[in-house]
Amino acid sequence: MSYADQVFIQNCRDILSKGVWDTDRPVRPKWEDGTPAHTIKLFGVVNRYDLRKEFPILTVRKQFLKSAVDELLWIWQKKSNNVHDLNSHVWDAWADENGTIGKAYGYQLGVRHHYPQGDMDQVDKVLWDLTHDPASRRIIAHMYNHHDLSEMALYPCAYSMTFNVSGNTLNAILNQRSQDMLTANGWNVMQYATLLHMIAQVTGFEAGELVHVIADCHIYDRHIPMVEEMLDKTPYDAPRFILDPSVKNFYDFTPDSVRLEGYQAHPVPGKIPVAV
């Protein structure tokens, strides 16, 4: 079975058997009908994925890699906060009448700062450091800017990446304040695994470990039957991940730069409600 399936299944079983409900207090998220969207959660979940062994993608529920990469590049490459620059509708619920989600996600990565090497944004600084100073322990991109939180439609969930080089291997830590296991876990893991592969390729390293740190790891009340259905599925083996080797510049990647070979997965378990 895919290692990502093993991690997902164990996380969900742990949440359902050991988790804590928030039904004893008011919560911000609501279902479409206005009902409070409560969760059962675990605090401080840490998962590790070795990208040298296999690509971490779920098979107990079909994943759509190109759509996930499109959103990833919308944030990290286009550095956009406008849904009109995105080829899916995953952010429509948070966009205003102009299509913007405020000073969130890509906006933060695109702000230019002054460094000794000159003015550049956070993504360019990561690429510069990995190319010119790979021994640095300061290679971080961070989107949780308190100064701008009041102007964000949604506070960043996956909010920072810390990059670290060991030998010829590029590793990274993804920090996430909140993780909706059913809708977002598989999506975020394959996104940031792809990002690590992309950045490793253009800076001359081998992609190594992705460490995923989740502060609030939860399942929504209305998602529990779907999660339980997924846990009864027999996982498939992980597919082979292929990244276009001809791309040498991070800004030249597109969703078509990635593909999977031999991917098998179970269907999505019906229409999944999303709490906003």
Image (cartoon, rainbow, N blue to C red):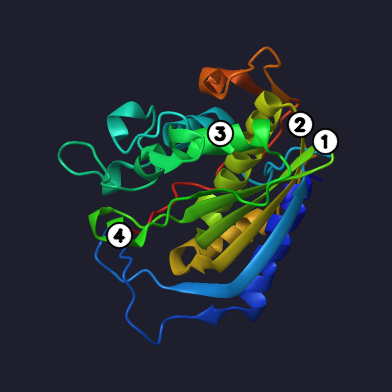
- Label 1: which residue? 168
Q: Residue furthest front?
A: 116
Whole-number angstrom distance, CA of label 2 to CA of label 4 = 35 Å
Q: Earlier in the sequence, mark 3 or mark 1?
A: 3
Measuring from the top left, give residue 243's x and y in whole percent: 68, 22
The type of residue carrying mark 1 is Asn
Q: Residue furthest bottom?
A: 24
Whole-number angstrom distance, CA of label 3 to CA of label 4 = 34 Å
The type of residue carrying mark 4 is His
29 versus 79 height, above or below: below
Neighbour tally class for label 2: few under 14, some 14-19, many 20 plus, Cα within 10 Å: many
Left of 56 or right of it: where is 32? left
Residue 52 seen in render: yes
Q: Earlier in the sequence, mark 4 or mark 1?
A: 4
Q: Which mark is residue 64?
A: 3
Q: Earlier in the sequence, mark 2 or mark 4?
A: 4
23 versus 94 height, above or below: below
Whole-number angstrom distance, CA of label 3 to CA of label 1 = 30 Å
Residue 63 seen in render: no
Whole-number angstrom distance, CA of label 2 to CA of label 3 = 26 Å
- Label 2: which residue? 205
Neighbour tally class for label 4: few under 14, some 14-19, many 20 plus, Cα within 10 Å: few
- Secondary element at image label 1: loop
- Label 4: which residue? 147
Whole-number angstrom distance, CA of label 4 to CA of label 1 = 37 Å
Q: Earlier in the sequence, mark 3 or mark 4?
A: 3
Q: What residue is at 53 percent from the left and 23 percent from the top?
A: 255
Q: Quadrant of residue 273?
A: bottom left
Q: Quick check: marks 2 and 1 in contact, CB under 8 Å? A: yes
